[in-house]
Image (cartoon, rainbow, N blue to C red):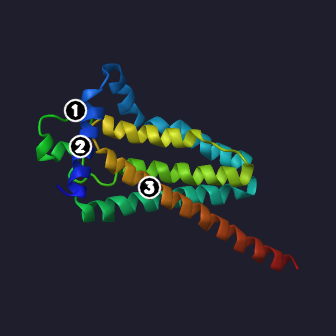
Amino acid sequence: MDILHSFRELDKVLFMLINHDTDVKFLDPIMIAIREPLTWIPLYAFMLWFSIRKLKHNAVLFIVMTLVAFAFTDAMCAQFVKPFIGRLRPCYDPELNGMVRSLVDCGGQYSFPSNHAANHFALATYWFFAIRHYLDKKWNWLWIWAAAICYAQVYVGKHFPSDVLGGAIIGSLVGGSAFQLSLRWQFVYNIKKDLYQK
């Protein structure tokens, strides 16, 4: 039995533990809501207001990089990584036939990585480092928010644990890169601004 096979088997055991063996009925609607994009509209509206109100002249860059990080992560995972890896979702996996508690529509055939995990960790990572840089505040709750969405994806039967872990890693890398890119853009902008003022 090779390491990859052992990892896949462990992944399925963890999936069944979260999705099937430790389910709590009153949590079902909560987990469904957590993974719904509409649930987080108030948060996105707050971040828009917060950036305009608190970040002042950095607000435009913050908003643009937020959109870039999200769009890049979503497109990369959906259009390139998922078709390339080709891993079946739990609800399509023949070995789990009849055992998956699918609380939401199964969706597309491929599972790795989770777009939800990648997108929200991209946002959490960029927001965390940007807010820390501009305002010297550590919004650790962002990691809990992104992790809760990842857990919900497994709970409702949409993804394996490794799918959300892979998505979280990809999203974190993209979010961190977006932050570094924003610093470089700001550095170049400030240099040009100083040159024009001289």
Element on which disc 2 rests: helix
**What quarter of the picture does the N terminus occupy?**
bottom left
Residue sticking out furthest to the front? 1
Which mark identifies residue 12?
2
Q: What secondary structure is marked by label 3?
A: helix
- Please state which of residues 54 and 172 is positioned toward the viewer in this rendering: 172
What is the distance, in whole Å, between disc 1 and disc 3 at their CAs? Answer: 26 Å
Decide if residue 130 is in sight here.
yes
Decide: marks 1, 3 in contact (CB < 8 A)? no
Q: In which quarter of the image is the C terminus?
A: bottom right
Side of 84 where 51 appears, left or right? right
Q: Give how far apart the Cα atoms at labels 3 and 2 are.
A: 20 Å
Q: Residue at x 42, y 34 (%)?
A: 34
Q: Name the residue under label 3.
A: 169
**Picture coordinates of residue 97 (x, y %)?**
12, 40
Q: How many angstroms separate mark 2 from mark 1 (CA)?
A: 13 Å
Q: Which amino acid does label 2 sit on?
A: Lys
Q: Which of marks 3 and 2 is nearer the N terminus?
A: 2
Answer left or right for 40 relative to 83.
right
Which kind of residue does numbered mark 3 sit on?
Ile
Quarter of image, res 142: top right
- Tag 3 near tag 2, CB within 8 Å: no
Q: Residue at x 32, y 22 (%)?
A: 24
Q: Residues within 10 Å of mark 1 (few under 14, many from 20)?
A: some
